[in-house]
Amino acid sequence: MKELTRLIKDYARCQGACAVGIATTETLSGGPPSTHIADVLPGARAAISFAFPLNQELIAPFLMKKDRRSHEKDNIDTNGLVGGLSLQLSKWLDQKGYPSIPQAPNDVYRQDSPGGVLDMVPEISHRYLAVRSGIGHFGLSGNVITQEHGAAVILGCVITSAALVPTEPLPETENYCDECQLCMASCASGLMSSDQTTVVSMGEKTFSYSKRRSYLRCEYVCGGFTGLHPKGKWSTWSPGRFVIPEKDKDFLPAVIQGVKAYAQRPEMEGGYHHSLMPGTKLWLTCGNCQLICHPEKAVRKERYDMLKQSGVVLQERDGSLTAVSPQDADAHIAGLDPFTRSLYVDVDDA
C-alpha cells in the first residue's frame, strides 16, 4: 500500500495537481455526512484528494472588471481537468483490482437534506477531505487555502476500496490566515457569519471556520442573479441590482424572482450549464472570497481595493457588460423602459 500510495500521488501530480493527499475511513471518522465515503462506495477505505491551481494572472483583470471571460474560461477548464483526473485515476485503480468512484469537482448535491439540492450540500465534501489530508488549511471564509496559490484552487477526489496510507493535516502554525476578514468584505451576500464558528472533527482532529449562513445567499449573488453590494459602490460581474435581503428567510422568494429575471436577460459571452438552472446557462460573475485570498496580505489588500474601485456592471441589449460609476449606472437604469428595468432592479424601484 505504501508503493501504491506513492504511485497515486505521482499520477496526480503528473496530470497537473499542485497538491495530493489521502484521507481514510479512520482519519475521517466522526465527521459529518459529507465525509462518509462508504455512502458513495460500499467498502470504501480511502479518498484521494487533490487540487489544481487557477491562473493567478487572470484574477486581477477579473476583479478590476476589465476581463470576465478569461477567468471564467480558466475556471471551467480547470474544473474539467479535475473531473478528468478523477475519472482517469478511478479507472486506473479499477484495473489494478481496487473498485473506485470518481467525484465531480462541483455541481453534485445531496437530495436527502431538508431543502434537497437547493441546500447545496455535497455528497462528498472536497473541502473537508482536502483539509484532513493536508492539501491546505481552512481560511476564515471556510475556503481551503494553500501556501502557494491561496484559495484559488479547484478541488477533486476519488473514493477507493484500496487501503491507502493516510497523509496528515498541515500544521496549524503554517496557516497564513490572519482573519483579515477581506473575504467577508468582498462577499456582497453576507454568506459568512462574523460572530459564529463551525467546528468539524474528523479522526480526532478539529478544524474551524466562519459559520456559513443560508447557501441561498451564495446562490443569489454568486449565481449571478444580483450583484450590487448593499452599499451601492461596487458590484460583482452581475448586472442585477436586486436588493440583497438581510434575513435568511427572505432569500428563497428573492432567488425565485432573480431566476425569472435572469432567464429573460440577453445572453452573455461564455457561460456553462448547471444542474440547478435547467434551460439556461450560468455565467461566472463572482467567487470574490476565493479570488481575494492570497498568501501575501499585501496582495489580498491590493485585490480588495481593485474590487472596491471596479465600479458597477451594466448589461447592454447585445448581452455585453460594462463597468461604470454608481452614478452613471443609476442614470442608465432610470432611462430603461419598465420591462427591461424589471430584469435588473426590484419591481418597486422600476
Image (tube, grey):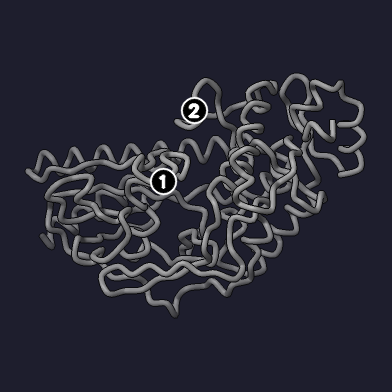
> Foreground residue, 296 or 264?
264
Image point (38%, 46%), residue name: 113
Compared with 182, 171 (above or below) is below
> What residue appears at the point 26 percent right and 53 percent down from the top-left corner?
48
Q: Nearer the viewer, mark 2 or mark 1?
A: 1
Q: Residues within 10 Å of mark 2 (few under 14, many from 20)?
A: few
Label 2 and label 1: CA atoms lie apart by 25 Å
Q: Residues within 10 Å of mark 1 (few under 14, many from 20)?
A: few
Give the image quarter of residue 26. bottom left
Q: Position of residue 140 (x, y in %)?
A: 54, 67
Q: Secondary structure at mark 1?
A: loop
Which quadrant would the N terminus be assigned to in this image? bottom left
**Percent x, y for residue 222?**
60, 43
Q: Secondary structure at mark 2?
A: loop
Residue 115 place in picture, x, y as percent = 44, 43
**Residue 323 image offset from top left, x and y in percent:** 79, 39
Of 128 and 198, the residue lying toward us: 198
User: Please, is residue 222 above or below residue 316 in the view?
Assistant: below
Q: Which mark is residue 114?
A: 1
Is residue 92 positioned above or below 295 on the image? above
Q: Residue furthest left?
A: 97
For residue 149, side relative to residue 247 (left or right): left
The label shown at residue 28 is none
Residue identifier under label 2: 273
Left or right, 346 with reference to 114: right
- Figure disc tally: 2
Q: Nearer the viewer, residue 279 or 183?
A: 279
